Image: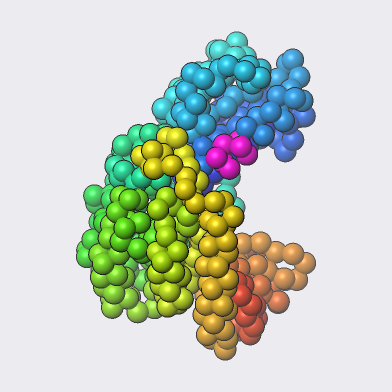
Amino acid sequence: MKIYVVSLGCAKNQVDTERMLGSLLQEGSEICATPEEADLMLVNTCAFIAEARDEASAVIIELVSQKRADQKLIVTGCLVNYYGAQILKGRQMEVDAWLPVASEAAISEVVGKLFKTKKTVDIPYGPRIRITPPHYGFLRIADGCDHKCAFCSIPRLRGPMAEEPMEALIEEAEEMAAEGVVELNVIAQDTSAYKKLPKLLEKLCEIDDLYWIRLQYLYPATMSDELIDVIANEEKICKYIDLPLQHVNEDVLKAMRRPTHAFTEKLLDKILNKIPDATLRTTFITGFPGETKEAFEELEAFVKKGLFHHLGVFAYSLEEATPAFPLGDDIPQEVKEGRADILMRAQKEISLKKNRSYIGKTIPVIIDRKEKDRGFGRRMADAPDVDNEVTIRNAKKIPVGSIIPVKITGAASYDVTGTAVLEGLV
């Protein structure tokens, strides 16, 4: 059986895709590059905001339009949870199976029924078939979220937080390291809420073949002093703090059901006191209901302080599946997007200044890909897929996945360039 896969959304969703493939590919199936080659087409969807739902629907409609009678199409993920039984109505009836998140573990059984085979078995948690490059991977330590942020539909789509057993996570990390993973990205909807996270990190640092361990998707209220200390003291843990704040105005934060700005300012001070060289990443939302001009200007002033190395800004999207829906959508779209543009222009200047501070320094860089003689990689300050790149001019003989010293020679607003220090490399 040949399987064509489309995995939409974030890295957390990608882990579900990898687990489903682990269940299917052990039956002798293989991944193919185009839908035309496929016996089975699998689409794992995101439904976090309207834009994500539109993207998922477009992919499904396109595959339905070219689907042959002998092909099967399965749609999984958050889009199925979002629409529920309603999704079975309308133009997309040529989808052969709709699997909500909780049913994805049974995909092998579903495929067996669709193709009338008897070889399939239900394997809930793997083995995973990673679709990331060989040298980095994602370790999802929990799924779901217990927070009730007003703008967010994740608790409805994914349910309450459910932690993976620590022993299973350590075993999974060891397996990835044995496969060649040197950078492990630890993720969840609220990564810092994992109860034994400091102990888990210490155990992960003991795995010899792992060199970088990165935490993503932290939450201010669950960042403990113990966790900050482990990040500060463990050499393998990237000093990378991904801490979405969403806003700084206290009235907006109260409406968002988020921690207060006074709380997060104290937290940031604590982090920077213990980890002075920390790379800070955050996200903000512009145009949340009730965001006044003055509230936005407060947010703009905070951004211009230049605390953050990486910044994402999203114009607010009114979502029916969220507690904020009754608040309405009182800010015009062009105002939301204009405010987002103002913040991103300010951050562009900040990013350029921070990147220029690297010029003349020699830093470790992981090589993600190569084009002719050039390599493209990341610093410990850059997460895969979402952050900046380092362009290395003399990378012809350096294998992808290597972590090498690079002298930074130039800087742009978001990316830097450098030369590999080849002396002493084996």
Residue pushed farthest top? Answer: 116
Residue drawn at the location 25% of the way across and 70% of the way down: 266
Is residue 309 found left or right of 231 in the rendered image? right
Residue drawn at the location 55% of the way across and 68% of the way down: 342
Tell me if residue 55 can be seen: yes
Which image quarter is the N terminus in? top right
Is residue 281 found left or right of 45 in the rendered image? left
Residue pushed farthest bottom? Answer: 360
Residue drawn at the location 39% of the way across and 43% of the way down: 327
Q: Nearer the viewer, residue 327 or 417?
A: 327
Q: Name the quadrant containing residue 302.
A: bottom left
Residue 395 screen position, x and y as percent = 69, 72
Which image quarter is the C terminus in? bottom right
Q: Vertically, is 414 above or below 9?
A: below
Is residue 376 found left or right of 123 in the rendered image? right
Q: Nearer the viewer, residue 362 or 336?
A: 336
Is residue 53 found left or right of 288 in the rendered image? right
Q: Vertically, is 244 above or below 147?
A: below
Here the colouring is: rainbow
Tell me if residue 216 can be seen: no
Q: Nearer the viewer, residue 101 or 377?
A: 101
Residue 278 screen position, x and y as percent = 39, 73
Q: Name the quadrant containing residue 361.
A: bottom right
Q: Vertically, is 228 above or below 222?
A: below
Residue 118 screen position, x and y as percent = 55, 12
Residue drawn at the location 75% of the way across and 25% of the way down: 65
Magenta segment: 50-56
Residue 102 screen position, x and y as percent = 41, 27
